[in-house]
Amino acid sequence: MAMEPRRLYSNPVFMATMIFMLGGWIVSTACAFQKPAYVAGSTWFILVYIPLFAGVLIWCIMANGLNKYRLALLTMIAMTMSQVIGNIGYYINSEVGAVQAISGGLIFVQIMLFVWVIALGSGPGTYLADLCGMGMDAVETRHEQVMKMGMRKVTATPTTHLRQLISGTSQAASLFRAKALYAYNANPDDPNEVSFAKDEVMAIVDSNGKWWQVQKADGTVGIAPSNYLSTNI
């Protein structure tokens, strides 16, 4: 499973939630060290556990494994949320400002965890799941197979005939066409992938697996993620 750091900064939900969550964690940790006599043992546990969870989340995103490990992540989040909410209630009514600030930081952590519960619980194909990058790891196996075996050579369809297919002049064309549900930018490190715009119509050369082989109107042949395409035109 390839680790790609670029998936981190290209994931808007991750970047926003991680900044707020770690910001809240830093506030709570700093205040806990200021007033250690007021801090319960369970609080130290959760303050250590939060960055460990963040590390696991970072690994899953870099490895394109959010969808594969979503149940494990949801279990970790459930345990974290139960601990965090208990600590918020414990410190929020304190008369010591630094101790009360511990609950303030944990409130930020709790809100961000709630966002991840919605995103991971929604599953691939939903808006939040797509923002989190959960759609692409479902098609990673096909991508790796293509990289290992090499892309199969196909006889290019004559340009005139291909344009007839895409324009829909033949009744049989609907069996061999796909419309892009979303725009897709090909991985610059993979020459087999093709980029396409939303609503672009392409001819399907091979629909086996999760990565389909398609041919664009300009004759370009390459692979495209099937969950970005629809044959209902």
Image (tube, rainbow, N blue to C red):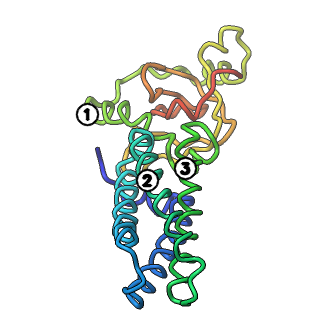
Q: Disc 1 marks which residue?
A: 148
Image height check: is 219 above or below 5? Answer: above
Residue type at mark 1: give it.
Answer: Lys
User: Mark 1, residues whose alpha carbon is within 10 Å: few (<14), some, or many (≥20)?
Assistant: few
* Residue visible at 50% across and 84% down in the picture: 99
Foreground: disc 2 or disc 3? 2
How many numbered marks appear?
A: 3
- Asked if marks 2 and 3 touch (Cβ < 8 Å), the reply is no
Left/right placement of residue 222 relative to residue 62 reads: right
User: From this viewpoint, which residue is outermost toward the top?
Assistant: 172
Pinpoint residue 43: horizontal percent, then vertical percent: 40, 71
Disc 3, SS: helix
Image height check: is 11 above or below 216? Answer: below
Left/right placement of residue 179 relative to residue 42 reads: right
Q: Disc 2 marks which residue?
A: 79
Disc 1, SS: helix
User: Mark 3, residues whose alpha carbon is within 10 Å: few (<14), some, or many (≥20)?
Assistant: some
